[in-house]
Amino acid sequence: MQTPDRPVASQTPAPATDDPGLTTDSGINSWSLPPHFDEGPPEPSRLVWIFSGSQGLRAGWSILIFYIFYKALTPLLGTIAVTIDPSLAKMTMSPSVALILELIPFLAILGGVAIVALLERRNILEYNLKGPRPVLHFVTGLVVGFAALAVLIGVLKLGGWLQFGAVGLTGAGIFEAGALWALAFLMVGLVEEGSFRCYMLYTFTRGLNFWWALAVVGGACLDLVLEGKGNGIYGVYLVAALGVVPCLLLELRKIQGSGFWQAAWVTSALFGFLHTGNNGENWIGIFAASLIGFVFCVSIWATGSAWWAIGCHAAWDWAETYFFGVADSGNVAVGHYLTATPAGSALWSGGADGPEGSLLVIPVVLLILLAILVLYGRGRQVRPFAPVSEPAAG
């Protein structure tokens, strides 16, 4: 195809103008936009938009990448550990074995979060680990966690739903086992709080609205229905149902910071969902696990970080498993200081689940919530960094 000949300068004189958008080059007319009409950077491609939002990697993809790396690292580290010490395969709940078995998911979670943090160009501490006075909050959480479990044990004892037996340890063994269990349950606190209340709560906060939250919680419930197995699964259904109306109202009223509470609902329901795989669990224990998960979310909202929750979680489990020697979410350990067994109705004693399966655990958890609100009231609270929610395309 031929194009018309360009007119030369001798044929068409350049017009005289002060318009900066009109320039001439050797007498040839050409037009260019003035600087203040610069169109700016090009719009991102559809592919880039799918994977990246206003805050970088979209939350859905972030969760998926973390999950893939965690599921890959866990069996790898487990195989290495069992190869070094074959006795770990017996899964005996002794303090030394528990410490190693909790170290495996801790390293896997740390590795998965580190990879995601690198992709998102974030500091690991941004995942709800920043905040004022972390040591003080951690120690306060330790005190409240032990005290709350002691109150529950005391009420069970007074009601005749718990009986104490002989002391399980004497002499130096008390301190040795106590120290090992303390390290093991510190790992438990770091693993469970680090995954649910640190990484997942932070990431879901920036990527959830009500409809995405409903899809995740509903998917967890559907999985329990289709699988037809799991202990105490009605506790998950109860948490799922209780969260629908409040979270929907937050969405409809466009409440600022609603993404944090949508994420709290999701992570609390998933925390209960995770515990349905424990032996001896009942619906009260699963509901209590979800409820304490939500209370730990409130502690992050109030203190600005997860350190209070980590301390409370570790102390509660240490007191339950080691100090009082009762079942912890259906698991009975060896190497505990005191020895106690449930008595009477399982509704009040908790039965095989332990104190967490007793109906009395619910008011005790609410007491923990009250302690948080009293210690860190609205006039003194430090809100955690809560990124602005965006629709999760992943």
Image (cartoon, rainbow, N blue to C red):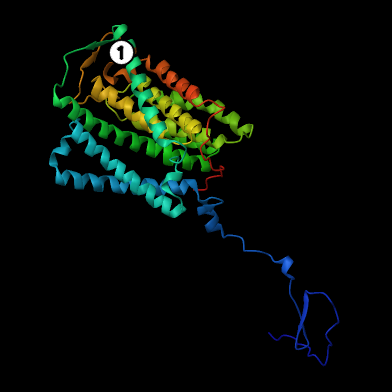
Q: Nearer the viewer, residue 319 or 54?
A: 319
Residue 17, percent across and down? 85, 78
Q: Nearer the viewer, residue 233 or 210?
A: 210
Q: Nearer the viewer, residue 275 or 95?
A: 95
Extreme residue toward the right, this view: 16
Residue at point 51% right, 39% down?
A: 205
Label total for image:
1
Residue 153, percent across and down? 31, 15
Q: Can the viewer see residue 234?
A: no
Quarter of the rendering containing residue 282: top left
Residue at point 20% right, 48% down?
A: 80
Q: Is residue 196 above or below residue 357?
A: below
Residue 220, percent across and down? 42, 34
Extreme residue toward the top, this view: 159
Extreme residue toward the bottom, this view: 10
Residue at point 15% right, 46% down?
A: 84
Q: Can the viewer see residue 220?
A: yes
Q: Is residue 114 above or below residue 320?
A: below
Q: Secondary structure at mark 1?
A: helix
Residue at point 43% right, 40% down?
A: 129
- Taking the image as shown, residue 200 lies to the left or right of residue 50, namely left
Give the crowd class for mark 1: few <14, some 14-19, many >=20 residues within 10 Å.
Answer: many
Q: Nearer the viewer, residue 90 or 168?
A: 168
Residue 327, percent across and down? 26, 21
Give the amino acid at mark 1.
Ser
**Mark 1, residue position:** 349
